[in-house]
Amino acid sequence: MLKDITLGQYFPGDTIVHHLDPRTKLILVLLYIVALFQADGWISYAAVLAVSVLCMALSHIRPKNLFKGLKPMLIIIILTALLNIFYTEGTPVLPGWIITWEGIARAVKMILRIVLLITGTFLLTYTTSPIALTDGLEMLLSPLKKWKVPVHEMTMMMSMALRFIPTLIEETDKIMSAQRARGADFETGSLVRRAKALIPVLVPLFVSSFRRADELAVAMECRCYHGGEGRTRMKQLVMSSADYIALVLGVLFLAGMIALKILGI
């Protein structure tokens, strides 16, 4: 299960999506999320699904990688579906049943919404390196510096968090493998017993995380890092014509979704 967590991973590529400016991709993801929550009817969800498939095709990201990232969310998806199926009033599927056709339809829509939401955000991290993502977010939030908001420090922390997610997952997998070799059992027994079995994993994981954070802080101090003041970028971000076209298409897509919601389809 741990190996299925792909958040924070970057898959290098030579596609039009990879070459887009990170600021463009951040804005497009925001527009995509707003448009997704505007979806109400089946046509709206079909439109969002079509856009998602198109983005996957343009970025050359295999669906296998996206679906692998959905596995850790499987419990939440199933629980959401069950709650909508059993707690939505309407026309019963069979006389006397608590399950209604409206509940089934709502459950399918909620599953689609969660899956499409995760897919859209994963495509951002899959096609954008953490450094580029940090630079783009810092430039978008740069107006907040006028109000003394530590934008650079915030984006730096986000970058380091994304960078170390795969590292922590790999460290956890190694610790669990070592504990299994010593006879630990993480998969059988009651929920309380399995939770207690994770204690020998969490303690060394926290110790390793704090040690890694301390080593990172020392390394940054040795390189004379003192925050964002006076710092320059190795790669300057420049918007191209493809970025402006993508932004226009994103705004048109959001406008179309709002129109579909008004029409009730």
Image: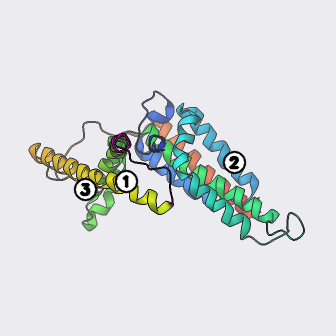
* Name of the residue lying farthest toward the right: 95
Find residue 14 and report its horizontal and vertical position in percent: 46, 27
Q: Which mark is residue 153?
A: 3
Q: Which mark is residue 140?
A: 1
Going by the numbered disc 2, the residue's amino acid type is Ala
* Residue drawn at the location 76% of the way across and 59% of the way down: 105
Q: Let me know if residue 187 is in the magenta part.
A: yes
| Residue linked to disc 2 | 47
Q: Earlier along the polypeptide chain: callout 3 or callout 2? A: 2
SS class of the residue under badge 1? helix
Going by the numbered disc 1, the residue's amino acid type is Leu
Find residue 226 and report its horizontal and vertical position in percent: 13, 52
Residue 12 in the figure: left or right of residue 68: left
| 213 lies above or below 40 | above
Number of numbered discs visible in the structure rendering: 3
Q: CA distance from mark 3 to mark 2?
A: 38 Å
Find residue 254 and report its horizontal and vertical position in percent: 61, 54
Q: Give the foreground label among 2 and 1.
A: 2
Of residues 205 and 255, which is closer to you in this image? 205
Q: Residues within 10 Å of mark 2 (few under 14, many from 20)?
A: some
| 67 lies above or below 78 | above
* Name of the residue lying farthest toward the front: 183
Residue 83: which quarter of the image?
bottom right
Q: Range of the magenta residues?
A: 176-190
| 96 lies above or below 45 | below
